[in-house]
Image (tube, helix red, strand yellow):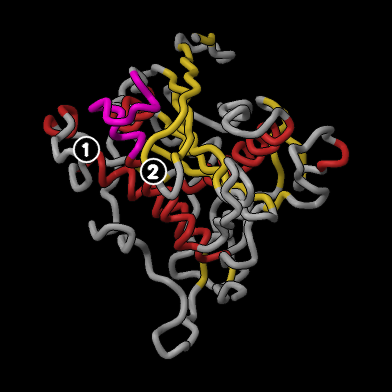
């Protein structure tokens, strides 16, 4: 199915709803939207090292339980999109939204209490770093072969930190739409391209998992649980390049989006229900548009200082047990 973009640029979106990728405990479901666009600009190098799910940024605390003094950017969303370009402040109100697929009022949350503000920042960065590991060839197809674009040389993507919060607003809107329309992947890309892009863009989605989604009651509400789902979902998307998964025959949109030399930036979105279902999205762009969404940074700053992207730096505190 092809959709015309609402933007004046010459581009189009292809929307493909697919079934599953790589098994977690059960099949992981995802779908994709891709825009064809202009060539990429130079990107920055990723900051993590390959080491499986341990390739993550510094965590809070220490082995002795001492708290690490630090500040971070608070990427916690403050609203959601109800449709493409239509933003509403605050979390969705299921009572006002009609059928909710069993989701009770007040049960949409932007960040679980078991994930700290600084862990959420780390999740956003980890998502970008993980995609860059595929583009660098550090992570490969499950059969060990190498992607041809990677072999030719792909630039890593810039983490568009100023767009993370907006990506989470889209993720929340898609999660809401999915629950309003029978669950599954029904909400995939319902609010896509509501956030800034430059030179075109694309979106990949990991549909809701855990917390009752797809009959899996396991809550995905800790740093490690989210990383586990994200790792498997991204691997499944990448493996479309070798047609490995029987649930996605002929589908290659996620892989093509991840490997595109026309992308140079990406932001990631996260949204949850209180029961522990998580919705993940990755939003790609031809370039960072600083005028629309300036980059965030709390490096060398104190809690309360301007984070550079419209918010205040947050002091890191341990998440609830």
Q: Which sits in the foreground, 35 or 234?
A: 234
Q: Position of residue 125 (x, y in %)?
A: 41, 53
The structure residue drawn at horizontal position 39% and vertical position 32%, both measured from the top left corner, is 287
The numbered disc on residue 141 is 1
Q: Position of residue 150 (x, y in %)?
A: 17, 34
Q: Residue at x 70, y 36 (%)?
A: 179
Q: Tell us which disc is closer to us: 2 or 1.
A: 2
Q: Position of residue 41 (x, y in %)?
A: 31, 31
Quick one: label 2 or label 1, which is nearer the N terminus?
2
The quadrant of the picture occupied by the C terminus is: bottom right
Residue pictured at 61% horizontal, 47% vertical: 271
User: What is the CA distance from the residue labelled 2 to the residue labelled 1?
Assistant: 15 Å
In this rendering, position of residue 18 left or right of residue 104: left
Secondary element at tag 1 = loop
Residue 120: say if magenta.
no
- In this view, 307 is above or below 251: below
| Label 1 CA crowd tier, 10 Å (few <14, some 14–19, many 20+) | some
- Badge 2 crowding class, 10 Å Cα cut-off, few under 14, some 14 to 19, many 20 or more, is some
Q: Position of residue 62 (x, y in %)?
A: 41, 83
Q: Which mark is residue 23?
A: 2
Q: Dot 2 lies on which element?
A: strand
Taking the magenta stretch, the answer to whether it contains residue 247 is yes
In this view, 239 is above or below 39: below
Q: Which residues are magenta?
A: 236-249
Residue 80 found in image quarter: top right
């Amino acid at each position: 199915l092809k959709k015309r973009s609402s933007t004046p640029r010459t581009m189009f979106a292809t929307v493909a709803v697919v079934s599953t990728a790589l098994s977690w405990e059960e099949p992981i479901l995802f779908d994709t939207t891709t825009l064809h666009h202009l060539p990429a600009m130079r990107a920055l190098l990723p900051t993590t090292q390959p080491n499986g799910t341990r390739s993550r940024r510094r965590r809070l605390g220490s082995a002795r339980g001492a708290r690490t003094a630090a500040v971070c950017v608070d990427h916690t969303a403050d609203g959601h999109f109800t449709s493409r370009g239509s933003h509403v402040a605050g979390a969705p109100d299921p009572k006002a939204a009609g059928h909710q697929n069993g989701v009770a009022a007040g049960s949409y949350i932007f960040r679980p209490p078991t994930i700290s503000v600084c862990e959420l920042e780390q999740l956003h960065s980890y998502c970008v770093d993980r995609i860059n590991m595929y583009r660098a060839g550090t992570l490969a197809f499950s059969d060990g072969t190498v992607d041809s674009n990677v072999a030719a040389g792909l630039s890593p993507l810039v983490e568009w930190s100023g767009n993370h919060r907006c990506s989470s607003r889209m993720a929340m809107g898609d999660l809401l739409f999915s629950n309003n329309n029978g669950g599954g992947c029904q909400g995939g890309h319902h609010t896509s391209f509501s956030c800034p892009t430059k030179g075109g863009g694309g979106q990949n989605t990991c549909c809701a998992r855990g917390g009752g989604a797809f009959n899996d009651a396991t809550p995905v509400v800790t740093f490690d649980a989210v990383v586990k789902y994200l790792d498997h979902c991204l691997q499944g998307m990448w493996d479309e390049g070798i047609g490995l998964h029987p649930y996605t025959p002929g589908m290659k949109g996620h892989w093509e989006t991840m490997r595109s030399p026309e992308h140079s930036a990406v932001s990631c979105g996260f949204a949850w229900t209180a029961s522990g279902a998580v919705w993940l999205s990755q939003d790609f762009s031809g370039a960072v548009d600083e005028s629309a969404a300036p980059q965030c940074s709390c490096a060398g700053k104190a809690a309360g200082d301007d984070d550079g992207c419209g918010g205040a730096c947050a002091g890191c505190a341990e998440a609830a047990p």
